[in-house]
Image (cartoon, rainbow, N blue to C red):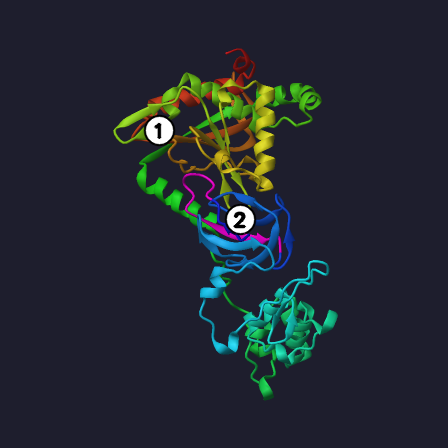
Amino acid sequence: MLIEVIMPKAGMDMQEGQIVKWKKNEGEYVKKGEILLEITTDKVNMEVEAEASGYLLKKLKHDGDIVPVITTIGYLGDIDDEIPELENMPVKESEKVEVAKIDSKKEENYIKVDKIRATPAARKIARDRNIDLKKVIGTGPKNRIQKIDVENYIESEIKITPLAKRIAEDKGIDLSTVVGSGHGGKIFKEDLPLESLKSIPMSNMRKIIAKRMSESYFTAPTFTLNLDVDMTKSLSFRDEIFDYIMKETNKKVTITDIISFATTRALMKHPHVNARLDEDNIIIHDYVNLAIAIGLEEGLLTPVIKDAHLMTFKEMVLALKDIQERAKSMRLSPDDLQGSTFTISNLGMYGITQFNPIINLPNSAILGVSAIQERAIPANGEIKIRPIMTLSLTLDHRIIDGVIGAKFLQELKNYLENPITMLIG
């Protein structure tokens, strides 16, 4: 029975997904529930399981392809099942493919094309490099051409000086793209593209980030309030409860945990900062879904801690560690990234002393947290060194005025300078 493999729709906002990597090869048997491929949505990597057992007969889309949701990207089924796409696809006489039946006992992973046996990986390299497989000697079983055979063929065909070869290997230069100026196309050092701009295509995640940041920047008229906080007592509070929390949760308490907990308490006292705009109405939330900005090499994620205002401090520590760990391993679900009412962005660990964060729409505000610095502070006629941290609150001026934002920051400052009050307030 032929079964379509489709690009899943993970979340209402998902319009397309990108195939990160197929986990199975064409011709390989797949059991129901096994991971078939990995995809990425706008911000989440997901593993797609096989809905039924069968052979992966055909991949219609490949690694790196961006595909609309609910689009067929491959077929599972029995060996003798016919694939509609292959039947209806016009093929030139010189490119006709004879698909060999797969021996379920031997499970040989190759496709027979004009009586040339080659693995899918070898065939892909040959296709990308425009190499005639008839010229390549296979070293695999039954003279099957493997990936290494094609790579060796490419290397043997390229004429290059020893110096140019060493430079190319050091710089990671693809020699198949280099035109040599020597006799017979021999490549010299001067032929290598040693100075060139590196062009990196934007990932699907990066495109979504660019789109949303542009929408936020050009939609909401914003302003930022900055306030210094003396973190002496917060640091002491962290040290005092460190061992207790470690024993109870096996997790380390951080300043981010304390700031996040204090923020939820301050938001419940100043709900206008915890709001959003809905056409001509201001929606004021009586709960806090706290988003935490997490920077990865692939881009920025803002996973959400739902109902953070109801959590104890210990529960907040556990929730923060959970979303941080799952974000770094790209194991967040689409639901983890939806429904925020307020966002915190902490760049303190990078030594940033002040910045203006961009609002994470549809939120009306975002809190920027900077590094703690030792500063000389006048107190009672004396100069004392104190650990000072700057909080930066960016606000949507369509919803929030400066006085409301300032009162929220003052409340948060009071909690952080007297952390015991946030446990009883």
Q: Amino acid at mark 2?
A: Ile
Where is residue 222 drawn, in percent x and y? 34, 35
Residue under numbered circle 1? 276
Q: Is residue 407 left or right of residue 203?
A: left
Residue 408: percent from left, percent from top: 41, 21
Q: Nearer the viewer, residue 222 or 319?
A: 319
Q: Is residue 290 magenta?
A: no
Where is residue 423? Give x, y as percent. Answer: 55, 14
Up the image or down, 218 lies above or below 406; here it is: below
Indicate the position of residue 368 as horizontal and vertical percent values: 47, 33
- Residue 116 lies left or right of residue 419; in this view the side is right
Q: Nearer the viewer, residue 245 or 38?
A: 38
Residue type pointed to by label 1: Arg
Secondary structure, mark 1, is strand
Q: Is residue 227 above or below residue 110?
A: above
Q: Residue 14 magenta-drawn?
A: yes
> Measured along the vertical axis of the image, is residue 130 above or below residue 312?
below
Q: Residues within 10 Å of mark 1 (few under 14, many from 20)?
A: many
Residue at (42, 16) in percent of width and height: 269
Q: Residue at x 43, y 18 (%)?
A: 268
Residue 160 in view in this figure: no
Which residue shows up at 43% across the image and 50% down it? 207
The magenta-colored residue range is 9-24
Which mark is drawn over residue 39? 2
Query: How many callouts does the rendering have?
Result: 2
- CA separation in Å, label 1 and label 2: 32 Å
Of circles 1 and 2, which is in front?
A: 2
